[in-house]
Amino acid sequence: MSVCHCLACQRRSGSVFAVQARFRREAVQITGASSVHVLTGDEGGRAHFHFCPQCGATVHYHAESKPEEVAVPVGAFADPGFPAPSYSVYEVRRHAWVGLPANIEHLD
């Protein structure tokens, strides 16, 4: 699971970072309708975000650079006991007051 501090993630999520759980595509079964929005990130990479057509919540997404993975926003699980993130990316854009678990990997 990761925390992303990129500006595009901040705008999309409405928060100072986005938390996601990533899974191998073959381990995920996606059913039901979704609306799709393609977003270009800070460094030009594109991601396809799938939203619930009824409530607008992001239900899953994938980056074109990692077609073998499906990401699910941790909030979609609605489980306060969900494990803490294992790494953080784009920390150069992190708000100074954001604290993260000390034992995670920090990637930029």
Image (spheres, helix red, strand yellow):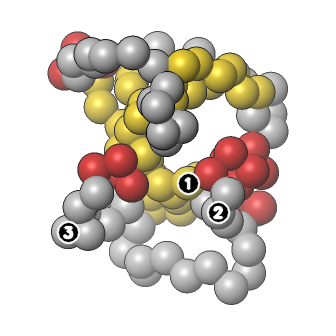
Whether tag 3 and tag 2 are in contact, CB under 8 A, the answer is no
Q: Residue furthest front?
A: 54
Kind of residue at disc 2: Ser
Q: Point out residue 10 in the picture as x, y percentages from the top left corner.
A: 70, 54
Tell me the crowding category of disc 3: few under 14, some 14 to 19, or many 20 or more residues within 10 angstroms, Cα based.
few
The label number, if any, that marks residue 18 in the structure image: 1
Q: State left or right for residue 28 relative to residue 38.
A: left
Secondary structure found at label 2: loop
The label number, if any, that marks residue 81 in the structure image: 3
- Front residue of 19 and 43: 19
Whether tag 3 and tag 1 are in contact, CB under 8 A, the answer is no
Q: Residue furthest bottom?
A: 97
Between disc 3 and disc 2, whose residue precedes?
Answer: 2
Does residue 97 appear anywhere in the picture?
A: yes
Q: State left or right for residue 97 relative to residue 32.
A: right
Q: Say which residue label 2 marks.
A: 15
Q: Point out residue 71 in the picture as x, y percentages from the top left corner.
A: 41, 34
Does residue 6 appear anywhere in the picture?
A: no
